[in-house]
Image (spheres, rainbow, N blue to C red):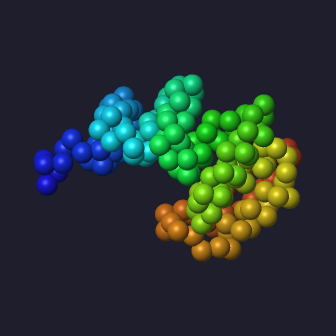
């Protein structure tokens, strides 16, 4: 079956993900680009490409890839989270919060999205709001079994390490 679908966008995305986990970034990028070309109305290859480019510190290209995903699907929360992560510096903290807020609205039951929003609030110094978001993550039922939601917080101004495994 895989042989028959080897040029399908979903196969290229799955294979690209596999290569990404092996840190074979150029190969993963090539497959994500092929997947996007094979299925132009599929947002996921664009956002995965953005994530790979961000890991390679190719921020401008990563932004373009995330925006391409949003052009296909304005509710693609992974692209919104990716844009927020690119803006995590203090100079762009407000923009990061804006992107993370859109992601949280489009995918409200995702613990990963809520954590991303909480991190942007910490970066802006809104520690009480961040604590509320993290408390919501800790106490809520989520759509993902793969997100660790049991964590402790240390959001003192001198050491803003948000997530520490228990």
x 57%, y 70%: residue: 142
Question: How many marks overall?
Answer: 0
Task: Confirm whether residue 103 shows in the render.
Answer: yes
Viewer-closest of 103 and 29 = 103
**Rendered position, 144 above or below 59:** below
Position of residue 42 measured from the top left corner of the image (x, y, whole percent)? 39, 46
Q: Quadrant of residue 20?
A: top left
Viewer-closest of 6 and 88 = 6
**Rendered position, 132 above or below 93:** below
Give left or right: position of 79 versus 123: left
Position of residue 121 measured from the top left corner of the image (x, y, whole percent)? 78, 50
Task: Confirm whether residue 22 shows in the render.
Answer: no
Position of residue 24 measured from the top left corner of the image (x, y, whole percent)? 35, 34
Q: Quadrant of residue 92?
A: top right
Quarter in which the N terminus is drawn: bottom left
**Rendered position, 139 above or below 70:** below
x 78%, y 40%: residue: 94
x 60%, y 66%: residue: 109
Quarter in which the C terminus is drawn: bottom right
Give left or right: position of 25 versus 68: left
x 49%, y 68%: residue: 145
């Amino acid at each position: 079956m895989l042989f028959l679908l080897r040029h399908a966008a979903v196969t290229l995305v799955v294979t690209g993900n596999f290569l990404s986990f092996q840190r074979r970034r150029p190969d993963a990028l090539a497959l994500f680009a092929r997947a996007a070309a094979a299925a132009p109305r599929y947002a996921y290859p664009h956002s995965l490409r953005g994530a790979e480019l961000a890991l390679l510190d190719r921020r401008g290209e990563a932004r373009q890839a995330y925006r391409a995903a949003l052009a296909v699907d304005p509710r693609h929360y992974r692209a919104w989270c990716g844009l927020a992560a690119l803006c995590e510096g203090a100079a762009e903290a407000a923009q990061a919060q804006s992107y993370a807020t859109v992601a949280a609205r489009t995918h409200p039951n995702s613990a990963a999205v809520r954590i991303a929003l909480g991190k942007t609030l910490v970066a802006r110094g809104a520690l009480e709001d961040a604590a509320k978001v993290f408390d919501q993550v800790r106490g809520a039922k989520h759509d993902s079994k793969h997100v660790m939601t049991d964590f402790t917080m240390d959001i003192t101004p001198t050491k803003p390490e948000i997530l520490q495994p228990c």
